Image: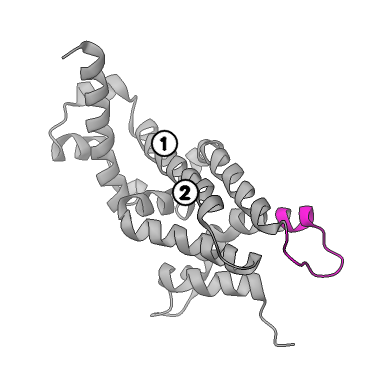
Amino acid sequence: MKQQDRAARSRSEILQAAFQEFGSREYAAVTVDQICSQYHISKGMLYHYYTGKDPLFLACVEQVFQSLAQLSLQLIDHCSCPGARLSIQYYFSAREAYFSKNPLEKGIFESALLHTPAHLAQDIQRLRAPLLQANRRFFEANLKEAPLRPGLDREQVLVYLEAVEESFWPMLRRCCTEAPPGESQPDLWRNRLLDLILFGVFSL
């Protein structure tokens, strides 16, 4: 096996091990020693390819964000829901379906955005930029023919939807934290919160 192939294989093995750990535990609960001992990886080899826990975590986060960006772009072509409201609901539902099939990715995503390590916040935001761009393309595609409330234009609505996507996860974290016992599950609050954001809280 060529040196380049061995290096790629070693990096892949380390990243897979990190995915298992960061996907099943919060960032603070994972250590380099734990990864090395659990998956029989020498510490020297890990530090040869990654300089520590933070770069390894960020590599996992970047891979998850890239996969979600690809999903958003695929949804542009495959979403056949009539109307922008159903399309946006479909967007969030498709993301949840993806997480259901990929629980490790879900764990990493939530560690990055629901339990963000403070010292990595700027790095995570930078890595998230391609995902936000893909989301905007999806929203743009589904707002082309959508009827809007009087006084609103499409750019204003795009900015709003981007703000919703940007703030959705901190809002979810707060709702889960402050909810009474039995009502704090993220899965329960995702659909509830999305319904409130899109359709309001008052009966007209």
Residues under labels 1 and 2: Cα distance?
Answer: 20 Å
> Helix, strand or loop at disc 2?
helix
Q: Which mark is residue 71?
A: 2
Q: Earlier in the sequence, mark 1 or mark 2?
A: 1
Q: Nearer the viewer, residue 170 or 102?
A: 102
Is residue 152 in the magenta section? yes
Instruction: Report the residue marked by disc 1.
Output: 58
Amino acid under disc 1: Leu
**Is residue 176 covered in magenta?**
no
Asked if the residues shown at circle 1 and circle 2 are in contact, with their CB atoms under 8 angstroms apart, the answer is no
Q: Mark on residue 178?
A: none
- Where disc 1 sits, the SS reads helix
Q: Which region is colored magenta?
A: 145-158
Nearer-the-camera pick, 87 or 156 = 87
User: Which quarter of the figure is the C terminus placed in?
Assistant: bottom right
> Quadrant of the image for the N terminus?
top left
Residue 75 visible at all: yes
Residue 22: percent from the left, percent from the top? 31, 46
Place residue 36 in its image quadrant: top left
Name the amino acid, label 2: Leu
Say which residue appears at 65% left-offset and 52% top-offset.
141
